[in-house]
């Protein structure tokens, strides 16, 4: 079949197997080059003690995949990914993560590394048990656990109750400029307040409860190495998005996640383990195009950071996490709240001053000058396997294979 990108209401319904594989390989190649000093802005991370056995919960796309790639190349790490994917059929494409897993694991094995993926509901007892059994049988003790799960739904493994996250305010209705990045049309988005039940549900899905459960069962099975580290990913963002993000329902979940880190670290004291939350940069994700306000902010941010030669994607961010944060010999640098700050370039005063000025003045007439919508769309295409210049998308393609 000929596979083209189909977007409905801001969501891509298709993924291209060869394109996803190529994008994954490009990220692998970037890390190889950075590790040998070919990217001047980045440390080679020499003489650092990187992890050797890594578990990534949510490691098939975005920050999770980028962490898996960075660990495998920098530390020659064996890696396990846990993610929920839709498999392909003869006439239907898989999720991008399904193709990414296949491509990464093929490349990892060429490097002589173990690499496995367990597909299913990471919130469930069944998938946790299956993962632990694999670790015990094939991997030994884990020295880095990454929690990078992004899901709108969680089913409580004990009660069977379903929880859905919502993106709403916790106060008054919020109105702000937004944009459809595909139609390039500015409009006003209105986001209403969440109920207390919706806030509770959002924290259940996106907070730190499941991260805690993973660390608990790993420790109970004696599958954590002495001195192990665990890290979960979060976001703060600028003031313009505070009402619907940091101060909204999702922000409540992120605060819970961040508070969880200290509780997990305390539980790891006897094996000298540590737990961190890394606050990362705003990036295009599979969900970015449909979140109110965020596409316009990201498009403006990309324009400014690219002009300043500060722009990073997932792979650059996670490479910097490994080489300049998590594995520093003199300790992990954190802010006053104990968080790793990989959003430091995004939140630089000069960057945010220009973002605010653009945000205040942007209109349909000056949109192309102030926002990088082309960059937004290109990145969205790439994470679904489209937009690769070396691939002829007019050719027939079997959605079940990446070669």
Image (spheres, rainbow, N blue to C red):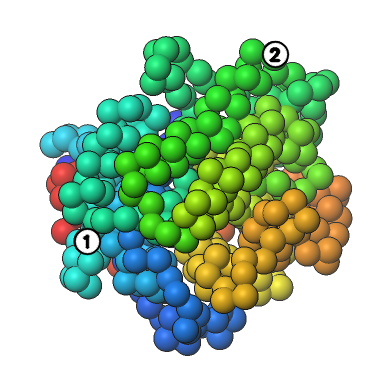
Between 198 and 160, which is closer to the camera in this rendering? 160
Q: In the image, what residue occupies the spot 57% across and 48% down?
A: 265
Where is residue 237 shown, x and y percent of the image? 72, 48
Which image quarter holds the C terminus? Answer: bottom left
Q: In the image, what residue occupies the spot 47% across and 61% down?
A: 227
Of the image marks 2 and 1, the number of the one nearer the N terminus: 1
Q: In the image, what residue occupies the spot 43% across and 51% down?
A: 145
Q: What is the number of the mark on residue 290?
A: none
Q: Residues within 10 Å of mark 1 (few under 14, many from 20)?
A: some
User: Judging from the image, what secondary structure is the residue with disc 2 in?
Assistant: loop
Residue 302 drawn above or below residue 32 = above
Q: How many marks?
A: 2
Q: CA distance from mark 2 to mark 1?
A: 46 Å
Tell whether 314 sits left or right of 13.
right
The residue pinned by badge 1 equals 114
User: Judging from the image, what secondary structure is the residue with disc 1 in?
Assistant: loop
Which image quarter holds the N terminus? Answer: top left
Between 292 and 104, which is closer to the camera in this rendering? 104
Between 362 and 336, which is closer to the camera in this rendering? 336
Tell me if residue 392 can be seen.
no
Where is residue 253 shown, x and y percent of the image? 63, 32
Tell whether 114 sits left or right of 24.
left
Q: Residue furthest front?
A: 270
Tell me if residue 76 can be seen.
yes
The quarter of the picture where residue 31 lies is bottom left
Q: What is the number of the mark on residue 195?
A: 2
Q: Residues within 10 Å of mark 2 (few under 14, many from 20)?
A: some
Residue 125 drawn above or below residue 320 = above
Where is residue 173 shown, x and y percent of the image? 80, 21
Where is residue 84 shown, x and y percent of the image? 33, 36
Residue 291 drawn above or below residue 104 = above
């Amino acid at each position: 079949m000929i596979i083209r990108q189909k977007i409905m209401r801001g969501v891509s319904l298709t993924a291209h197997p060869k394109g996803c594989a190529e994008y994954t390989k490009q990220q692998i190649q970037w890390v190889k080059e950075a590790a040998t000093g070919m990217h001047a802005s980045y440390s080679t991370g020499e003489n650092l003690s990187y992890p050797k056995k890594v578990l990534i919960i949510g490691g098939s796309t975005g920050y999770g995949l980028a962490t898996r790639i960075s660990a495998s190349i920098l530390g020659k790490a064996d890696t396990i990914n846990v993610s929920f994917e839709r498999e392909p059929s003869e006439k239907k494409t898989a999720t991008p993560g399904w193709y990414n897993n296949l491509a990464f694991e093929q490349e990892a094995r060429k490097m002589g590394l173990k690499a496995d993926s367990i597909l299913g509901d990471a919130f469930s007892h069944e998938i946790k048990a299956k993962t632990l059994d694999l670790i015990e049988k094939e991997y030994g003790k884990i020295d880095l656990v990454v929690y990078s799960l992004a899901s709108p739904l969680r089913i409580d493994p004990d009660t069977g109750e379903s929880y859905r996250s919502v993106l709403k305010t916790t106060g008054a209705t919020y109105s702000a400029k937004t944009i459809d990045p595909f139609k390039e049309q500015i409009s006003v988005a209105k986001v209403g307040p969440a109920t207390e039940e919706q806030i509770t549900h959002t924290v259940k899905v996106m907070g730190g409860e499941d991260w805690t459960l993973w660390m608990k069962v790993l420790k109970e099975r004696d599958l954590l190495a002495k001195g192990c580290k665990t890290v979960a990913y979060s976001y703060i963002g600028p003031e313009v998005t505070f009402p619907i993000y940091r101060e909204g329902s999702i922000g409540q979940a992120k605060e819970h996640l961040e508070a969880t880190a200290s509780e997990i670290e305390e539980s790891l004291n006897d094996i000298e383990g540590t737990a961190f939350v890394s606050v990362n940069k705003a990036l295009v994700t599979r969900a970015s195009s449909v979140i109110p306000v965020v596409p316009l902010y990201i498009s403006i941010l990309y324009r400014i950071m690219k002009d300043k030669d500060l722009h990073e994607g997932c792979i650059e961010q996670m490479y910097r996490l490994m080489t300049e944060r998590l594995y520093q010999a003199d300790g992990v640098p954190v802010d006053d709240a104990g968080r790793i700050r990989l959003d430091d370039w995004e939140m630089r005063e000069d960057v945010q001053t220009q973002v605010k000025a653009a945000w205040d003045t942007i209109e349909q007439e000056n949109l192309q000058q102030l926002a990088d919508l082309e960059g937004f769309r290109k990145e969205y295409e790439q994470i679904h396997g489209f937009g690769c210049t070396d691939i002829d998308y007019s050719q027939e393609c079997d959605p079940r294979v990446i070669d």
